[in-house]
């Protein structure tokens, strides 16, 4: 297969332009890198990056089988190349081309992980290693790619990549599935779509309005009933009944300087007052969700 058989006409022009740029010697690399880093010479940056667009094309070609647009892969590779140019330190004993290759590959890999599926695949080092190496390792270990891995096979792959066995199992299941459109028909002869079978557990709009209305009403009734309590009774009810995590009898007793038994008595007395006050306003507090107990 020709190097450019996998790309469109527009992409071929980009590739031809990249391949025409002459390679740089080590000395010329350093000269341009220093001009950019020390003098912000944009012409030097342009010359440096254009000379290594071929690295972007080569990296993009290795990831073409993930089904993503070649132009997008190249664009992400260029972002990695620019990042390398911004971070490269000329005084380190390393070629810019070597340094840039890592950034280009990392940028494209991150793009593939984000876009290979609408379901997030994961971005940890373990997920990345498994995503890009699982099929290769199965082939190398002479394991059928279409069959599930045995426990021993998962363990060997986990040891090879330095990840957990359960991560191998999770990624194997993720890679064996495919995205399905919710608008696709359930069957060949069916007019029903998959989205019609999805159950929504959220309340209906009229139920939401009713719940909100009833909530406001209960709050107003309880607030009004609380006026029948003394200051200490009101404090106990707020701390014991109206907090997300109610206070204990012992803690309230220590705070108020009384025994926890006395706190219990005051709470019971206050609840009785609340029930009386609510009954005056509505016939059945329990039916309205306002039971003081």
Image (cartoon, helix red, strand yellow):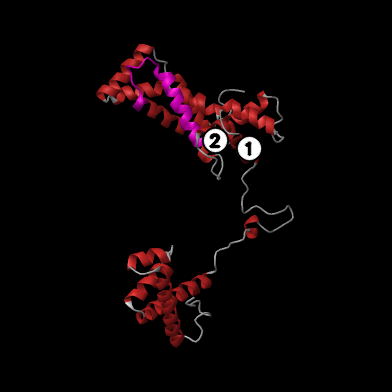
Of residues 208 and 279, the one drawn nearer to the viewer in this rendering: 279
Please identify, in this view, whether the residue under mark 2 or under mark 1 is nearer the observer.
1
Label placed on residue 110: none
- Magenta run includes residue 269: no
Q: Which residue is mark 2?
A: 127
Quadrant for the N terminus, please: top right
Q: Decide if residue 122 is in sight here.
A: yes
Note whether 92 is above or below 79 in the view shown.
above
Which stretch is magenta?
Answer: 85-112
Position in image of residue 234 (x %, y %): 36, 74
Report the residue that reaches farthest toward the left: 39
Position in image of residue 133 (x %, y %): 59, 29
Identify the secondary structure beneath mark 2.
Answer: helix
Q: Which residue is mark 1?
A: 169
Identify the secondary structure beneath mark 1.
Answer: helix
Which image quadrant is residue 104 in? Answer: top left
Characterize the local packing of mark 2: few (<14), some (14-19) or many (20 or more) Cα atoms within 10 angstroms.
some
Residue at the image position 41 percent from the left and 32 percent from the top: 79
């Amino acid at each position: 297969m020709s190097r450019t058989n996998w790309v469109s006409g527009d992409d071929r022009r980009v590739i031809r332009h990249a391949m025409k740029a002459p390679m740089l010697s080590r000395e010329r690399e350093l000269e341009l890198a220093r001009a950019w880093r020390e003098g912000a010479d944009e012409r030097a940056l342009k010359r440096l990056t254009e000379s290594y667009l071929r690295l972007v094309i080569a990296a993009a070609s290795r990831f073409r089988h993930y089904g993503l647009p070649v132009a997008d892969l190249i664009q992400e590779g260029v972002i990695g190349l620019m990042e390398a140019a911004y971070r490269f330190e000329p005084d380190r004993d390393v070629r810019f081309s070597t340094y840039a290759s890592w950034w280009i590959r990392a940028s494209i890999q991150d793009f593939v992980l984000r876009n290979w599926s609408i379901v997030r695949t994961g971005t940890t080092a373990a997920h990345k290693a498994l995503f890009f190496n699982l099929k290769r390792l199965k082939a190398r270990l002479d394991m059928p790619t279409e069959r599930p891995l045995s426990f021993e096979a998962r363990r060997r792959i986990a040891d090879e990549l330095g990840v957990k066995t359960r991560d191998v199992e999770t990624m194997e299941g993720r890679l064996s599935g495919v995205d399905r459109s919710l608008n696709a028909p359930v069957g060949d002869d069916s007019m029903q779509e998959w989205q019609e079978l999805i159950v929504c557990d959220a309340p209906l709009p009229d139920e939401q309005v009713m719940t909100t209305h009833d909530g406001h009403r209960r709050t107003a009734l309880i607030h009004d009933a609380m006026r029948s309590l003394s200051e200490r009774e009101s404090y106990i009810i707020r701390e014991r009944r109206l907090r997300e995590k109610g206070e204990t009898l012992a803690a309230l007793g220590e705070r108020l300087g009384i025994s926890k038994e006395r706190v219990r008595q005051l709470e019971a007395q206050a609840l009785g007052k609340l029930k009386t006050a609510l009954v005056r306003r509505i016939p059945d507090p329990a039916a309205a969700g306002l039971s003081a107990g």
